[in-house]
Amino acid sequence: MSTLSYRGINETVAAVTGERQRVVDGPLRIAKLDRRQFMKLTGLVGGGLMLSFTLPRAAAASGPLQPNGYVRIDADGITLLAKNPEIGQGVKTSLPMIVAEELDAAWDDVTVVQSPIDSATYGMQFAGGSMSIPMNWAALRQAGATARAMLVGAAAKQLGVPAEELSTMDSHVVHKGSGRKLAYTALAADAAEMPVPEAASLTLKSTGDFRLLGKRITGVDNEALVRGEALFGIDVSVPGMKYAVYQKCPAIGGKAKSANLAEIKAMPGVHDAFILDGNDNAMDLLPGVAIIADSTWAAIRAKRALTVEWDETDASKDSWSAAVAEAERLRGEAGERVVDEGDVDAAFESAAERVSGYYTYHFVSHAQLEPQNTTASFADGALEIWAPTQTPDWGMDAVARATGIDKSKITLHQMRCGGGFGRRLYNDFMCEAAAITQRAGVPVKLQWTREDDMAYDLYRAGGFHQLEGSVDAEGKVTGWRDHFITFANDGRPVSGGALGQGVFPNGLVENVRFEQTPLDWKNRCAAWRAPGANVFGFVVQSFLHELAAAAGRDHLEVLLEVFGEPRWLVPDNPGTLNTERAANVVKLAAEKAGWGRNMPDGRALGLAFYFSHMGHIAEVADVSVDADKKIKVHKVTVAADVGPIVNLSGAENQMQGSVVDGLSTMMGLSVTFENGRVQQSNFDKYPLLRMAATPKVDVHFVDSDFSPTGLGEPALPPLAPAVCNAIYSATGHRIRTLPISEEGYTV
Amino acid sequence: MASLRVNVNGEVREVDASDPATPLLWVLRDELGLVGTKFGCGISQCGACTVLLDGNPVKSCSFPVSGVGDSTVTTIEGLAGSAGELNPVQQAWVDLDVAQCGYCQSGQIMAAEALLRSNPDPDDAAIDAAMAGNLCRCGTYVRIREGVKTAAASMKEGRT
Ligand code: FES
Ligand code: FES
């Protein structure tokens, strides 16, 4: 029996984050507001970290104005609730800003708190797929406008004037005629008695009337952050809490047969040690050995002294070097056809120029800076969890599967996440903490070490692409074939491991064929910032440059020609690429970067575009290369069309961060496997970019009227091809492997 | 229980010394409840655990508590003034919205603080060198560099 399954969440996550085919199949999935859900009153969460977070729900009777889960106004102030996990993408600030805009609350008057996890009130609460803004835009505007209408209604009553004579500004209702002004806080009690208006009766602002959106707003947690206050999962402390660590088999799928438990339990500060069998679902609870101690250090020290006998019968034997050899063998063959448009063979036969290239990239790790952790307390049949997760609700499902505790008996407190990048879409660490407290009967904080994080990540898979392309006598791109040798967990292609209709240049080049051959893989793979796009961007935008070069044409000109006539690739589907938006950002980035200007020897501009997560993004990298293949990225010019900007500071931060993340990953990051074991254990072997190598980043947003979309991911994919294209233009050397340190480049 | 006295943020605290090799990081976090100092790698690579020892930056994950001796330890919780006002580095970080996830930022702020105490007017090269031990996985380096400069400028203003 093959013991490990990879049930559940991969599918769910792919569906919700839109990784599978959202871009071509049917209309965009924007959550519809259920009016009953919307009106349901919700309690507030607050209080210090040392206390239980479970506070009684606020009474629904007179008192605060609380028409929905997002707004609460009383005499003391205006509180807005942020529904989704904060992982560094800024949603704890940007989502409440949308409410505040329609509410006409002065931002300085607003206190933001993290909302409870409550799908009946909030619908899906998660951080993934750059979906927070597009999925919540409409509902949050409505939430703010609803409260505003009730405040205006209360003011009309108090002042004895028709509501039409009233306006709102800076947390006040204003009667222009008489100059009278009433504060929201003073109106709240009366407003709470007003009927909740029908959604259809609300008037939302036009974008031109926005006062707050588009401004630079500093993050709502920033002051607490710079004071070092407890915000993150790792900072949680509950009464009676012990500290736990959990050792899993170095090759995933191995089971703990026995361990030196007596010796471990006799160590100073150790409270308990035991073996857990796991639940046979690789995404939930892997088998391992738990150690519970009086401090994190005592637990780590004991873990170092732990010796475990593993049964590796069903354990991973994954080998990167074997996969490389297998892909080399397969690349000359045909794969399963997943997209086949036009007649690629005919296009190749009639080509003026044919080009082929073999592109490869390594596995990488999420390496979010806060190692995984969860605090959990099981008592009287109920489980309370404090976790830095991207998917709190699905996390509770996973915990229920792993422990047998009914979901109705589980309470989860959302903690700020020290980075996510997709890793915390999966909640194996949460399952471990739950199973350990369930068995031990004491509250525990489970702490992974960095070595645990590197060894038990759900990796961004590596891949291999055999590409062929053609241009005709006019230098026009006519044919494109990509045979993708990819990886599959449990028989299904991993996240980012499948080509589909939405992958460039399908729909843009007449004759396109995508073929696929998956290699079986046991180590877990999953979504990593901009899944699929983060590597396809490199492959296809580099190869397009190869075709332009083969035709002797300017890259910019060819790219614009490929976009062609203005259109949505799927008519009227705003989830798909729009060629006009694409052309606009490419032209803007080129213009701002000074495309076409003369550059000194060894220095050049490189261009790339990618569409992902509904974002149209172009980047131009200004790069110089010396004789020792040391590169310097002087500047990256970014142009983006993601609709109206919610928080300009947060939006630019995501662009800057995506550029740095993209550069960091393409320069020197890789994870390799032999005999099922990950070969890198910590940051000394996984060299994230440091400050000195950081380029200037020049960000430009297209002022567009499309519905706003997310920015956590789409600026990453164009970075690597822009830099590699610049290196080609500077040196004539085409890079077809990531990270580029594999080809001797340093930064 | 063997104990040790350490001076943290101006207060003398009694801490467990039964294992003198215990990294200062875990004493601060688990024993003293000063959780602003973060754990990222445990091997002196990321700087999330940076604190000041007599004003110099130290990676507390790799510094044994027994090594503190008579030195004074300053953590992120010890930077604000007596009335709770943010110091210039903290204020610059808020004003420029430096953080993304924010997890590295305690360490970044402590490294920047140490730099500005020894070099009130650092150029880019000095900033890059002083901040080289601190990783930011979210890639906020552009703003950290700005933050150091902004803090330097406001400290200069404060002095004149
Ligand atoms: S935790 Fe100390 S340097 Fe990373
Ligand atoms: S802000 Fe996330 S690691 Fe620096």
Image (cartoon, rainbow, N blue to C red):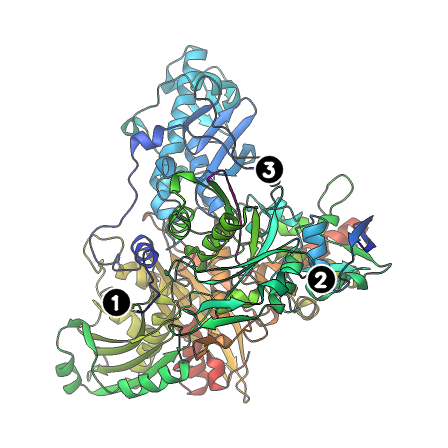
Image quadrant containing the N terminus of chain A: bottom left
Label annotation for residue A563: 1
Residue located at (22% from left, 82% from top)? A471
Q: Secondary structure at mark 3?
A: loop
Q: CA distance from mark 3 to mark 2?
A: 28 Å
Image quadrant containing the C terminus of chain A: bottom right
Q: Mark 3, chain letter?
A: A
Q: Is residue A150 above or below residue A411?
A: above
Mark 1 or mark 3: name the one nearer the start of the chain.
3
- Residue tagged 2: B60
* Residue A604 at x, y percent in the picture: 46, 79
Residue A696 in sight from this viewpoint: no
Mark 2, ligand 1, within 8 Å: the answer is yes
- Residue tagged 3: A51
Q: Secondary structure at mark 2?
A: helix
Q: CA distance from mark 1 to mark 3?
A: 57 Å
